[in-house]
Structures are given as structure tokens and as C-alpha cells.
Amino acid sequence: MTPQSDEDEVWRQIVASFNDTAERDSADQPWPDSENVPAEPTRRVVKPSEELEEDLDDPEDKHDDGEEEGEEGHYVPPPPPPLPKLDLATKLAWVALFGGPAYLLVAAMANWHMEGWALFTAVAAFIGGFVALVVRMGEGPPNDSGWDDGAVL
């Protein structure tokens, strides 16, 4: 017999025994018999607690001040800190970064005839705004970050 025919025979046996039930022999199980699951699961009946039954019987005893209960445990976050003030150069860099592509997009959608200098100015504004923002980013942590600036790689 060839190795291929042996493998084919093994696969045929696996497929033939796919739907067969497993034999329940305690010697083959790696766990104790007490941990075997019964064939039919045990049914449990859950009874409501006495407090819930009282609430269901007397719905008139509810609190009239429902707003106070709704507010209990409600977290109101503090207002966020104000945005930092930007200087004129940073504002112009942001306008150039978004203004150049916005002009090109509007002009293309409106089918405007664009001169060469307008195209050059829009692309140069985008590139210049990007470069200005990257250069102004700084190289280190802020001065007010304290002595423990977290993990620095």
C-alpha cells in the first residue's frame, strides 16, 4: 500500500464516523465522573424577591420627585479648558493649509478657468502652511509638563 492510499483510508474512516456518538467510558475521560454533564439539564425556577413583589403590588407608593432619583449618580463633567490663543503666523498657516486645496476644489467643481499663477499660489499656500506648522511644533515637551513627562523613547 502507498502512503496516499493509507491517508485516504483514514479520511474515509473519519468521515464515516462523523455522526457516531462517542462512547462514554470513564477510563478514557481525563476528568472525574462527577464533572460529567447530565443528558438533560436541570431546570431552575427563579422567584422574584419580596421587595420586587411589594413594588409590583403597590405602584402608588412610588416617589413623586422622579427628577431627584434621575439626578442621583449623574456625572456632570467640568467645562473644558479654553483653547490656547494662536498667534497670527499660526492662524495664517492653518488658513493656507486648508485654503489652498479648498480653492482648487471649488474652482474645479465650478468649472472656473484657472490661470497658472493661481494654481501655483494655491499649491504653494498648502505646502507653505504645512511646513510652517511643522516647523512651529517644537521639539520637546511643553515647559509646564513637570518633572515626570511619562515614557520618553
Image (cartoon, rainbow, N blue to C red):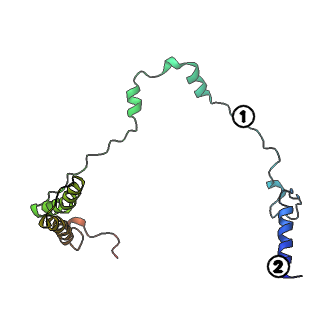
> Residue type at mark 1?
Val
Q: Residues within 10 Å of mark 1 (few under 14, many from 20)?
A: few
Check disc 2 and give the amino acid type. Gln
x, y (%) of residue 53? 61, 24
Is the C-beta separation of discs 1 and 2 under 8 Å? no
* Quadrant in the rendering for residue 106: bottom left
- Front-lying residue, 2 or 71: 2
**Residue 72 placement, left or right of 2:** left
Q: Which residue is mark 2?
A: 4
Foreground of the two, 115 or 101: 115
Q: Position of residue 25 (x, y in %)?
A: 89, 60
> Considering only vertical position in the picture, is 105 above or below 146?
above
| Residue behind mark 1 | 45
* Crowdedness near tag 2: few (<14), some (14–19) or many (≥20) residues, C-alpha within 10 Å: few
Query: Going by the picture, which residue comes out furthest to the left?
Result: 88
9 vs 109, left or right, is right
Q: Which mark is residue 68?
A: none
Q: Residue at x 35, y 72 (%)?
A: 151
Residue occupying the point 81% across, 64% down: 30
Question: Where's residue 149, x and y in %?
Answer: 29, 69
Q: Residue at x 86, y 62 (%)?
A: 16
Residue 72 location, quadrant: top left
Q: Which residue is at the front of the view, 60 or 136?
A: 136
Which quarter of the image is occupied by the C terminus? bottom left
Depth order, front residue of 32/106: 106
Disc nearest the viewer among 1 and 2: 2
Ranked by sequence position, the earlier of labels 1 and 2 is 2
SS at mark 2 in the image: helix
Q: Assign a secondary structure to mark 1.
A: loop
| Quadrant showing the N terminus | bottom right
Residue 112 placement: quadrant? bottom left
